[in-house]
Image (cartoon, grey):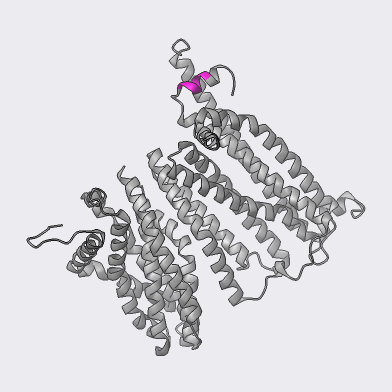
Amino acid sequence: MNQWASLGEWLAMGGYAAYVWPSIGLAIGTLVVNMMMARRRHAAALQRALRRLAIDGYGEA
Amino acid sequence: MATWTWFHKLGSPPHVYRIAGRFAPWFGWGALLCIVYGLFGGLVLAPPDYQQKDAFRIIYVHAPAAWLSLSCYTTMAVAAFVGLVWRMKIAHAAAAAIAPVGASFAFVCLATGSLWGRPMWGTWWEWDARLTSQLILLFLYLGYMALRSAHDDLQRADRSSAVLAIVGVVNVPIIHYSVYWWNSLHQGATVMKADRPSMPSEMLVPLLVMFLGFTLFQLWVLCTRLRAEILERERNARWLQEQIRDGAR
Amino acid sequence: MNAGERAVPTGMLAAGAATFRRDVVLAFRRPGQMLQPVVFFLIVTTLFPLSLSPQLSQLRDISPGILWVGALLSSLLALESLFRADLEDGTLEQWVISGQPLAVQVLARILAHWTVSGLPLVAAAPLVGASLAVPASAFGTTMLVLGLGTLCLSGLGAAGAALTLGSRRASVLLSLLVLPLAMPILIFGARGVDLAILGEPTRGPVLLLSALTILTLSLTPWAAASAVRISLE
């Protein structure tokens, strides 16, 4: 921790802020987008399956 | 006999659906913890590199992204092989589920490599061996996904893209080494590979934790997307109706 | 495939030879179609001097690249139709039910395709090379590596063509599938031409390219055969 004098210095990344932060941001963004897409796909598939179940009826199984 | 039971169970959608659902949260939270710690360790705790100063911190996302894109391709090819040889539909579903993830991280690896190259090499793009073979890997992913989407019939899409994945995975090492060979002829050792002493542990540990975190993330995405694929593919199966009616999702 | 009056030899090699003969005969009946890739090769390689500079010394430096990109694109042209007509008229089904190993048939098809599309490119290579200021001493190696490379490409292309059977927009898709896999061929082949132009020993790239060709020809027929089976299901 001792290497960063202040938050501003940390954000400046020794002058490489313009390269470091977009990289980190892109990676985190891709992680988040992948996560959301996976969750949304699962949720949508589950919704469809539930709707089918509601139409086909509960009685038959 | 007993050693094969687990393998056959892996072929059964209900079993996989339940197992994937049970493990997914562990993978997910594990990935979150590892990535948060890895980023903290890499961006805050680790000392700057003696040569590249703070620009080297891009490695904490660049290298794990490269690893993930390769490991997704391997997973895909192994799943494709299992699907073709043992006619296991669930394996095809897994291959289909993991391809877009691998492609997106191949892209992240390229983009962060470019962002890293700009201050280090002075250009956005250098025909560096590792970046070039990563680019070809991205093309292989795009071809795989294009082939999959070009077939209307799901079975045919599964099986032909599986053949392509296997052809691709045989080719990956050849491409890799040919690109290295080509690169070493045309330029000396790359800047990034310059005579670096081995990393001190305060740099290395966060990196390894990031690798672990990305791997866990891959497993989480695989579980979740596989569950979605199973729900789509098995929508008429009775077990599925019973499963979701009982509230176990 | 008319059996004719003579006693017909049977067995997988005979079947492969029959396929090879049939393909080559069919191709030679339409010489115009056969020459299209060569004409394309000549045109593409003409584009480079026009778009870059007519200075021969500069052209010589980049001629391996021009030759190889031209050859790569030209052999892609002929690939799409590799199995298509046979899928439509049922020949592929005959292959499958003939009881002969499908991979051998596919290998015969690959060799025939190379004979009618790869060899003309090889024959045209000195012409193109001369126009790009490649010294005559390098023609031999250039033709050798182009021959090996196009053979390798025919193998990869057969797998690609079989995989895209029955899919939409097959020709673009085929290039998308085959070109990334063909990069090692391009690397070794262009390097071989490069060394030949410089008058240096070309053993390394030639041997690597030969190894790659042998590997490709021993594996891709199986991949293409399983892809053909999938498309017939």
Q: Would residue B202 be seen by someone viewing this image from the given angle?
A: yes
Q: Position of residue B107 (x, y in %)?
A: 60, 53
Image vertical order of residue B175 relative to residue B138, above or below: below
Q: Compare residues C146 and B89 and report the one nearer the observer.
A: B89
Specify whether C16 is left or right of B169: left
Specify whether B240 is left or right of B118: left
Q: Position of residue B62 (x, y in %)?
A: 68, 55
Q: Would residue C52 be seen by someone viewing this image from the given angle?
A: no
- In which image quadrant can residue B176 be found? bottom right
Q: Position of residue A47 (x, y in %)?
A: 53, 24
Q: Compare residues A33 and B29 and report the one nearer the observer.
A: B29
User: Residue extending furthest left?
Assistant: C5
Image vertical order of residue A46 relative to residue B93, above or below: above
Image vertical order of residue B191 relative to residue C79, above or below: below
Image vertical order of residue B26 relative to residue A47, above or below: below
- In which image quadrant can residue B2 be found? top right
Name the chief secondary structure element in magenta: helix
- In which image quadrant can residue B220 be found? top right
Range of magenta residues: B238-242
Q: Compare residues B186 and B244 and report the one nearer the observer.
A: B244
Q: Position of residue C116 (x, y in %)?
A: 27, 69
Magenta run includes residue B240: yes
Q: How many callouts does the rendering have? A: 0
Specify whether B21 is left or right of C183: right
